[in-house]
Amino acid sequence: MKAVHHSDIRQGDWVDRYLPALLQPYFRLARLDRPIGTWLLLYPCLWAIFLADPKITLHTHSWFLAALFCLGALLMRSAGCIINDLWDQKFDQQVERTQTRPLASGALSRKQAYLFLGLHLLLSLCILLALNPLTQALSIASLLLVIIYPSCKRITYFPQIVLGFTFNWGALTGWTAVTDSLSLAPIFLYIGGISWTMIYDTIYAHQDKVDDERIGLRSTALYFKSNTKIWLSCFSLITLACFLTVGILLDRSYGFYIGLLAIALHFIWQLTTLNIDDPQNCLTRFKANRMIGLFLLVAIFVDDILLSLG
């Protein structure tokens, strides 16, 4: 199979047009030019916050928490990208899609990247101090996942599971930030989010499968191969089952379940139109998963309004 020539950095975008040359590689390193990862990290946080506190009012403390988690998701996603690029610098130089990244291309040094990472972690700590002790402890524990994830692609065909554990941790911390406790609902929300990550990150991994196989990296794309759609169909069912369980546990009404129907239809569209041998097709469907997160969040809001109206 012939690799398609492509890069994950868009030339001539707002970073090139509006930022001074000195700042451009830092914004690229933090993936601020590609916010999809921040959205995928943020949505489980927001789901949990507004499921834990179903009062849709501008006076609720949950909106303050949501704002903190928005900033925290931005910082921690960027920190995770910096760590990933520090770990993978030599591999990125051998993968066509990632050769132009700031560390792989030499636009930034490792020292500059470490200093930039330190700034992100310092700002994240400031946010953490505003949360309750249980949420602080859970957030600190998630750092272990952030650190080990980049190495997983070297030793297992399932690094996507570790990414799922990492990216959906907000389903737990968002809930504890509101309630200062854990229960079955956020745990099922977390499991559903992990299964969802298996879908979108497997699709994402198909972009690099030729280069990954050549240089000895592993992924679910290489493990599932031509059976990818079958596996992703199973993960779609698991995701929906977990979200349905959350709705039942929290006694949600029909507004929530209509959102689940929209998610199911979106999964059907993704899987029926997915071409695992077309990197652009995979990238488009990967990015489309922002709609999955949005559908569930809107469903929660609509259902809260319906519940408040009695």
Image (cartoon, rainbow, N blue to C red):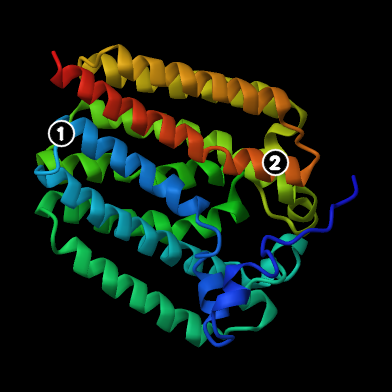
Residue kind at label 1, given as amino acid type: Asp
Mark found first going from the N terminus, 1 or 2: 1
Position of residue 230 relative to residue 32, above or below, is above
Residue kind at label 2, given as amino acid type: Cys
Position of residue 124 relative to residue 44, above or below, is below
Say the numbered circle drawn on residue 126: none
Q: Quadrant of the N terminus?
A: top right
Q: Quadrant of residue 174?
A: top left
Q: Is mark 2 on a helix, strand or loop?
A: helix
Left or right: 127 with respect to 208? left
Instruction: Identify the residue position indicated by label 2 in the image.
Output: 282
Q: Quadrant of the C terminus?
A: top left
Instruction: Identify the residue position indicated by label 1 in the image.
Output: 53
Residue in view at x 72 percent, y 69 percent: 99
Q: Can residue 29 be seen in this view?
A: yes
Whole-Å distance between the Cαs marked 1 and 2? 36 Å
Along the viewing direction, whichever of 13 and 257 lies nearer the viewer: 13
Along the viewing direction, whichever of 8 and 176 lies nearer the viewer: 8
Q: Quadrant of residue 124?
A: bottom left
The percent coordinates of residue 248 (x first, y second) are: 26, 14
Left or right: 222 with respect to 172? right
Residue in view at x 67 percent, y 72 percent: 90
Left or right: 248 with respect to 92? left
Residue in view at x 34 percent, y 59 percent: 143
The percent coordinates of residue 252 (x first, y second) are: 24, 16
The percent coordinates of residue 34 (x first, y second) are: 55, 59
Q: Callout 1: 10 Å neighbours few (<14), some, many (20+)? A: some
